[in-house]
Image (spheres, grey):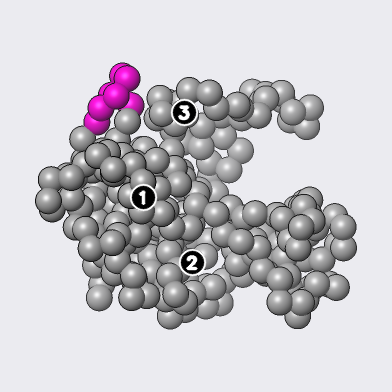
Amino acid sequence: MYSTKINGEVLEFGTSGLLYRSNKLMYDRATETLWRQFTGEPVVGTLVDSGIKLEVLPVLLTTWGDWLATHPDTTVLDADTGLYPAGLYVPEWDPQSIYYGLRQQPESSFPVWDKSGRLPEKSQILGLIVNGEAKAYPVDTLHQQPVLNDILGGRALVVITPGDRAGSRAYQRDGQRFTTISLGGRDAAEVFVADQGGEEWRMEEDALVNVNNPSHRLDRLPSQIAYWFGWYTFNNATGIYGQE
């Protein structure tokens, strides 16, 4: 996910229909420059070599139920888009979903010349880049370790995964080492994590917030959910959590 605001101007993007290393190329409607979807960089057109790169925003892959429990005022795009029948918008794990067959394939749908066998080709990972250093966190590992303390690019961080389908969020740490997750608030929808000193922190979308001192906040880090082959293609020097 990217911010589309560049030099004070908001660009509108579309799908070009072109692929690069089995990954979509976007285009902006103002200049018709092609952009790499995976890195947010212009690659063909007038904005190439401009030094522009889209700002990465944190992303979360979760279920509607889990999201709605903590964000009850969320607005939703209408499934009746006028482009496709609303009945086509079914969960990705439903065999009737448009790309179900492609998602079940163990390999990429189109050729990718630069691959790594360190993980299965279509393993899902949470990708982080901190101070120029990249690391992939396998989603299966994050479910096994719902509170994962790590150091990347010289910065301490924690990845929190509240449930099997609740999605993972990465935050910076400031000397804390987090230990356990608990639920609270209305309908037990809020997520809290405790640090080594017993202090509780509330998990919010933009930061971890100290319950006793709300001015003490630990910012969320930008991240990507990706297939391993896609992440590796654009981050050859990446580490893998658990394979250090």
Give the label on residue 71, or none.
Answer: 3
Disc 1: which residue: 217
Q: Are marks 1 and 2 in contact (CB under 8 Å)?
A: no
For mark 3, does the 10 Å Cα neighbourhood hold few (<14), some (14 to 19), or many (20 or more) residues?
some
Disc 2: which residue: 231
Of circles 1 and 2, which is in front?
1
Question: Between residues 1 and 180, which one lies in front from this camera angle?
Answer: 180
Question: Between residues 109 and 87, which one lies in front from this camera angle?
Answer: 87
Can I make out residue 22 in this image? no
Between the C-alphas of marks 3 and 2, the distance is 30 Å
Of circles 3 and 2, which is in front?
3
Residue at (74% x, 28% y) in the render: 81
Question: Is tag 3's residue or tag 1's residue first in the polypeptide sequence?
Answer: 3
For mark 1, does the 10 Å Cα neighbourhood hold few (<14), some (14 to 19), or many (20 or more) residues?
many
Residue at (36% x, 50% y) in the render: 217
User: For the residue marked with disc 1, what is the amino acid?
Assistant: Arg
Q: Position of residue 130 (x, y in %)?
A: 43, 70
Using the rendered view, name the quadrant where residue 210 is placed: top left
Task: Determine the secondary structure under disc 2.
Answer: helix
Give the magenta part as a residue range: 183-189
Left or right: 34 in relation to 157 = right
Between the C-alphas of marks 3 and 1, the distance is 20 Å
Left or right: 241 in relation to 220 = left
Residue at (50% x, 52% y) in the render: 58
Using the rendered view, name the quadrant where residue 183 is placed: top left
Task: Determine the secondary structure under disc 3.
Answer: loop
Task: Determine the secondary structure under disc 1.
Answer: strand
Q: Are marks 3 and 2 in contact (CB under 8 Å)?
A: no
